[in-house]
Amino acid sequence: MKPLICTNKMKVFSIYFCLGTVAALVFLSCYRQALAQAGRNVASSRRTTVLPLNVRFSEDTTKRKPLLGSKNLQEAEKILTKDKVELYDSGVFQKIESLAPDPSPARIVILLDNSATLQTDVKKLAAVPAAFAPEIYEGDKVMVIGYDLKPEVVTDFTDKPEDLQNTLSLLRKTDTPHLFDALDVVMEDVLRPQVGYSKRVVVLVSDGLDRDSKVKFDKIFSTLQDENITVYAIQVKDRTRGALRKDGPKPVDCLEQLTIGTGGKIYSVDGDIKQAVKEICDELRNERYQLTYYPEGINPINKRHLLLTSFDSSVVVRLKGFHPPHRF
């Protein structure tokens, strides 16, 4: 058998073939971008989208049974089904693939503002993790993190009541609050590795003030929404008295956007903390559903507002306000 000899003609053909392949790939990429910018459906917008929902039955409280146990879970599946709601993504009607209760365990991070000028004391801060001790369900785990210039772990993920009840001696008040940096660390180092859990939650005890974080509000807000992290807030009195911020929203607006935008709620630190924590835990276990759909006819590079309506007037649904832009 003779060795294969590469002639000049073959070299030229190979060069033209490679150039043609590159040109085709470039054209395909540009074509996909053009489709996306025109708002047409492309493969990237066809990825499965899962939305966590909090569902409350405002009239018939007998329907609010724990989702644990096969009997109650079957009853919950019959109460709210995909044919009883309509979903709109960017104003475009979407076909719902599935809608079902989510009885899975939660991973909860309590993020405490440790800064010196926060308008509450350490004892009030410690009361929040302590209130979780009798309320978490089997399989749930809670981590406690305090932050000022940087976040520090107070208690690692635990389901032991004594760990959550004994945080007072581990807390302090010092320095200034880098809230957005703390949220970024919680997202990247704590909650992102917990991707196998559909219920990933931040309970933020703060007035919403951030001073000079490297991470900007819009970035961390988009990340929380993109990862389906739900933020609840135990709100402390605003130490700035409504002052404008040059690098982010006012503290009160910050908490509103973080909670409403991710499907969470705001409670007051001066209210009944035990009742607030009980409502959060009951909501996560008894009122949590998952909705799945494949986006059609939308532009994934734009911010996409979400609307879910129910044909049952007794059903109150809460979900994140919108999807953040998806960059190719």
Image: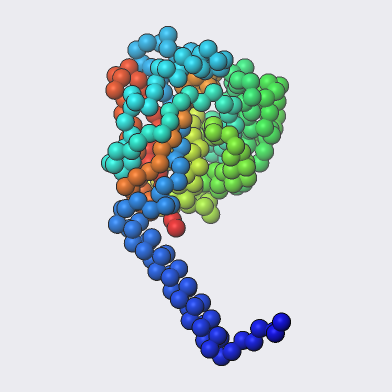
Residue 176 versus residue 129 in the image, above or below: below
Q: Nearer the viewer, residue 288 or 130?
A: 288
Residue at (47%, 73%) from the top-left corner?
21
Quadrant containing the N terminus in the rendered view = bottom right
Residue at (42%, 52%) from the top-left corner?
43
Q: Can residue 67 be seen here?
A: yes
Is 264 placed left or right of 88 in the picture? Answer: right
Find residue 63 and report its horizontal and vertical position in percent: 42, 12
Residue 72 versus residue 224 in the image, above or below: above
Is 195 placed left or right of 20 in the picture? Answer: right
Q: Can residue 236 be seen here?
A: no
Find residue 48 and report its horizontal and vertical position in percent: 46, 42
Is 185 placed left or right of 33 in the picture? Answer: right
Q: Quadrant of residue 99?
A: top left
Q: Nearer the viewer, residue 119 or 285?
A: 285
Number of disc labels? 0
Q: Quadrant of residue 111?
A: top right
Toward the top, the furthest residue is 62
Residue 66 versus residue 244 in the image, above or below: above
Is 186 placed left or right of 49 in the picture? Answer: right
| Way the structure is coloured | rainbow
Residue at (57%, 15%) from the top-left corner?
69
Toward the front, the furthest residue is 1
Quadrant containing the C terminus in the rendered view = bottom left
Find residue 292 and report its horizontal and vertical position in percent: 44, 35
Q: Nearer the viewer, residue 21 or 282?
A: 21
Q: Nearer the viewer, residue 190 or 30?
A: 30
Find residue 244 and report its horizontal and vertical position in percent: 38, 47
